[in-house]
Amino acid sequence: MTIKQANITINVKDMYKSIAFYESIGLVVKARWDNYYAQLVAPGIVIGIHPAKDNTTNANSGNISIGFTVDNFDEAKSLLENMPVQTTERQEEGGQFLHFTDPDGIACYFIKPKW
């Protein structure tokens, strides 16, 4: 067996709002099946967006976070500052981090690694 592709699927409250959010931070819609499922891509990752049953979610990430490596940390920070998104900046041995959440409370972060 060979795995040809993988993705993370997120159950969301509002497909349109979630797709717009991920597009606004630079992902591109790869495929969409009406309001049933969508795939958004960035280099090295495919994120599936699926409506939650009964339009409810836990509004948190549990043990999941989605990281996006960026080449220009200031540009990423500016992008989020222009959106209604709260951020927390952190710097450590590995690099600079900018933590934020998607519309359903999924933990995300931009990182500019030191390596």
Image (tube, rainbow, N blue to C red):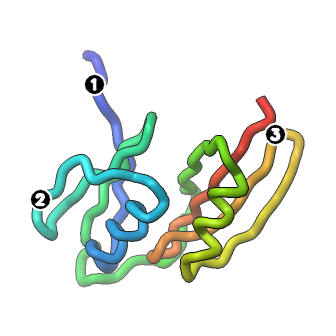
Residue that extends furthest to the right in the rendered view of this protein: 93
For the residues labelled 3 and 2, the Cα–Cα distance comes to 38 Å
Q: Do the residues labelled 2 and 1 touch (CB within 8 Å)?
A: no
Q: Where is residue 27 in the image (x, y as percent from the top left)?
A: 40, 52
Position of residue 98 measured from the top left corner of the image (x, y, whole percent): 71, 60
Horizontal relation, residue 90 to residue 55: left or right = right
Residue extending farthest top:
1
Residue that appears at 15% across and 70% down: 35
Residue at the image point whose x is 34% and y is 82% from the top: 56
User: What is the x, y in percent for residue 70?
Assistant: 62, 45
Residue on which disc 3 sits = 94
Query: Residue 4's mark?
Result: 1
- Single out the mark in the foreground, 3 or 1: 3
Q: Name the residue under label 2.
A: 33
Amino acid under label 2? Trp
Residue in front for this viewpoint, 114 or 79: 79
From the image, state whether disc 2 or disc 1 is nearer to you: 2
State which tag comes first along the sequence, 3 or 1: 1
Q: Earlier in the sequence, mark 3 or mark 2?
A: 2
Residue plotted at (39% across, 49% down): 8
Q: How many marks?
A: 3
Amino acid under label 1? Lys
The C terminus lies in quadrant: top right
Label 2 crowd bin: few (<14), some (14–19), many (20+), radius 10 Å: few
Label 1 crowd (10 A; few <14 / some 14-19 / many >=20): few
Q: What element carries label 3?
A: loop
Mark 2 or mark 1, earlier in chain: 1
